[in-house]
Image (spheres, rainbow, N blue to C red):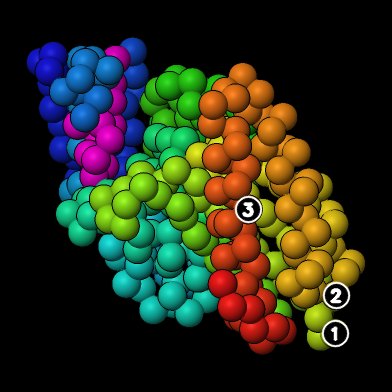
Amino acid sequence: MKPFDFYAPTTVDEALELMHKYQDSVSVIAGGTDLVLELNEYKATPAVVIDLKKIKELNYIRVEDGVFRIGAMATHASLAADQAVKEKVRILHDATRQVGSPQIRNLGTIGGNIAQSSVAGDGLAACVTLNADVTLRSVRGTRTMSINDFLAGEGAQKRNILAADELLTEISFPVPDTKHTATAFYKLAKRKSLAISVIGGGMVVTVDDNGVCTHASMRGGALGRYPMHFADCEALLVGKKLSYAAMLETLPIMHDQILEANRSRPWSVFYKKEGAQGVFKKLFADILGQLGIEEVQE
């Protein structure tokens, strides 16, 4: 590990001033579950490390005017334990409760997971499926954008749009109407615990009073650099009466998209195609069960 200067600010404003001052060579640590490994392996060699753990104003989970607002320093464990998240946003509850070990869940934060934009980030996949917004702050000002736009840009770390002097402070999304909307997350891993996702899947579906799908969001994690968007699958579902049979019709489209995206890695494409099918069958059954439309044995 290369020596560095260490700061532990207690307010967001203090952190932003430090980030602006040292932006030429600075890394931010939240839970440290990713950065500590990068420092030890010399994958990250900053001159300055800023620890956000003492900034209490970024650690919250609340609902305001029909919107979930989650501070970047909220841990995976706190999200998994939050009753409102469990009842209203199953996808985020299931994603965060399956992250790593209890130690990692207690240390790791949702903001760090999104800012790192890891290929296998479970919290990231859930938030992308929800089409959440993220808020970024710097001494230059504040900007809020869709998480999909956040991932589409190229900032200081080449992982997302985040600039070197910018801090991700909040994740937000409308509270789902659980009478008409179901959300679900499932991950396939090589072992039951302490596992990084081999394939993760997220799904959000809304139906009208007649059971016709009015909105669908389908994302596959660890299938590409960012959660893969199955837009054609979504389009196939919208306007149809939701059923397991209708949902199964999306799988050939999904297979073709995964095949096309992984042509350069033929040794893994068969596994990914079959694995994604299994993951989404689980999601289909979960979604239908939550909406009370159909009981599927998986």
Nearer to the camera, 41 or 165: 41
Q: Nearer the viewer, mark 1 or mark 3?
A: 3
Q: Which residue is mark 1?
A: 210
Q: In whole angstroms, how far apart are the C-alphas of marks 1 and 3?
A: 27 Å
Q: Are marks 2 and 1 in contact (CB under 8 Å)?
A: yes
Where residue 78 sits in the image (x, y, percent)?
A: 30, 65
Where residue 59 sits in the image (x, y, percent)?
A: 30, 58
Identify which amino acid the numbered label 3 is placed on: Gln
The residue positioned 23% from the left and 55% from the top of the image is 101
Q: Which residue is mark 2?
A: 241
Q: In whole angstroms, how far apart are the C-alphas of marks 2 and 3?
A: 21 Å
Q: Are marks 1 and 3 in contact (CB under 8 Å)?
A: no
Which of the labelled discs sits on residue 277, or is there none? 3
Q: Is residue 160 above or below residue 145?
A: above
Q: Is residue 52 above or below residue 103?
A: above
Mark 1 and mark 3 lie on one chain; the one further toward the N terminus is 1
Mark 2 Cα shell of 10 Å, populated few (<14), some (14-19), many (≥20): some
Mark 2 and mark 1 lie on one chain; the one further toward the N terminus is 1
Q: Place residue 94 in its image quadrant.
A: bottom left
Which of the labelled discs sits on residue 225, or is there none? none
- Say whether residue 135 is magenta: no
Q: Nearer the viewer, mark 2 or mark 3?
A: 3
